[in-house]
Amino acid sequence: MQIISKPLYVYLQRPDNGEWVTVGRYQAGPVAGKGYFKYAPSYADASHDWSIDPVNLPFLPGMEKEARRYGGLHDVLRDACPDAWGQALLKREHNLPSGTPMSRYLLLASNADRWGALAVGTARKPSIAELQRPRLPQLSLLVEELRAIHERLPPVDIRLRRRLVQTASVGGARPKATLRDDDGQFWLVKPQIATDTADIPVLEHVGQQWGAASGLNFAHTILHRQEKGRSAIRVLRYDRHGGRRSMCVSAASLLQAEYPDNLMQTDRWSYPRLAEELRRIGAPAEDRLELFGRMVFNAVCGNDDDHVRNHAVVYSGSEARWRLSPAFDVVPNPVETPSTLTMQLSTGRFDISRAALLADVHRFGFGSGEEASGYLTALLTRIEHGYLQVADCLDPHSEEMLRQRMQHNFARLQAS
């Protein structure tokens, strides 16, 4: 097979000791839309056997694996690319045309801020200097600069503007950046923006805190009230622990479903299918139960932005296995009470109903429908009590909206 492009080397921060190693090589093929990945011989020779994607790139030394999606880019490398916000910054900075291959964004984005524990470069060995995360300045300045970028205004701080463009690696469509606090923790900062029809940071904070108060594993958040009544949210990054990074794979990759490049593949967008993938990659049984709980919570709060890039797994070095990541980007719909979710609740069913929730419970690990029904009833009680702990964060209009939505959806989900 003739390969004509220059190779792009993929680096991994080892989950056992934090050292950086070259894990493999990616090359685009001579035909447009083709790409190939191969684990590095040196990686195999050193007896490393961590798979960077347990579904699409299992550790098979010596084999070259062709990419099936994303115009010839492997799923886990697409995970390491910037999404809409980061792509927009890179387009402006480098004057990129529409249709720029995703592999170009992969190379242009900074290794310092990528999601997960992968980095890329054109050298065979990783450059540690390029992998260091610079500290960003105080929160208020960061928030104002993000808003200025979004509104295409002149820089508030020109050095910060340059740094934000250089580190445009994290995903999502909203303005965001990573901030490292004085304790060495990494937070994703997302401000309220002028085009918001509601206070989205407040709704996200409430959604995350509400889920945690209901006994589910949700990423920790801190809400910041800014000047002029605008807010910002800080979300703790679960893929960063001081100077160490954790391998991550999106549910889009696990389910082999392109997002947002192929929005017609919704047959693959499925909570039960994701539960089965969790079992297949060795995640413990409690992770499937947790996923079921998140599905129920999203139905109750009306988070219909629960697409396949808003779920993920993270590799636990201490357990030497993949785990369901903490829930993130849980935002109740600010406009209306949805009747469906974006992910299937059971085979072919997106509707928010008790029947849809309970149709495929065996795939989540329940032994019987009666067991699942009892768990659902108890969870709904926890969700109701959890709401009382977070309701005071909301303005009166939003509090009334979410309380009525909760009661409306309880009627859909409780036993008759």
Image (cartoon, rainbow, N blue to C red):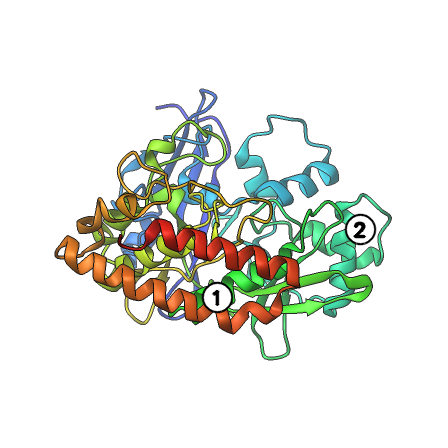
Residue 14, horizontal then vertical, whole percent: 39, 63
Look at mark 2 in the image and give the residue it sits on: 148
Q: Is residue 133 left or right of residue 358?
A: right
Residue 145: image quadrant is bottom right
Look at mark 1 in the image and give the residue it sits on: 210
Residue kind at label 2, given as amino acid type: Ala
Residue located at (69% from left, 48% from top)? 196
Q: Is residue 65 left or right of residue 140?
A: left
Q: Is residue 77 visible?
A: yes
Disc 2 or 1, which lies upstream in sequence? Answer: 2
Residue 368, horizontal then vertical, whole percent: 13, 55
Residue 394: image quadrant is bottom right
Q: Which is more foreground, mark 2 or mark 1? A: 1
Residue 27 lies, with reference to residue 21, above or below; the image says: above
Residue 230, horizontal then vertical, whole percent: 75, 60
Residue 63, horizontal then vertical, whole percent: 27, 38
Residue kind at label 1, given as amino acid type: Trp
Between the residue at mark 2 and the residue at mark 1, the CA separation in whole angstroms equals 31 Å
Mark 2, Cα crowd under 10 Å, few <14 / some 14-19 / many 20+, is some
The quarter of the image holding the N terminus is top left
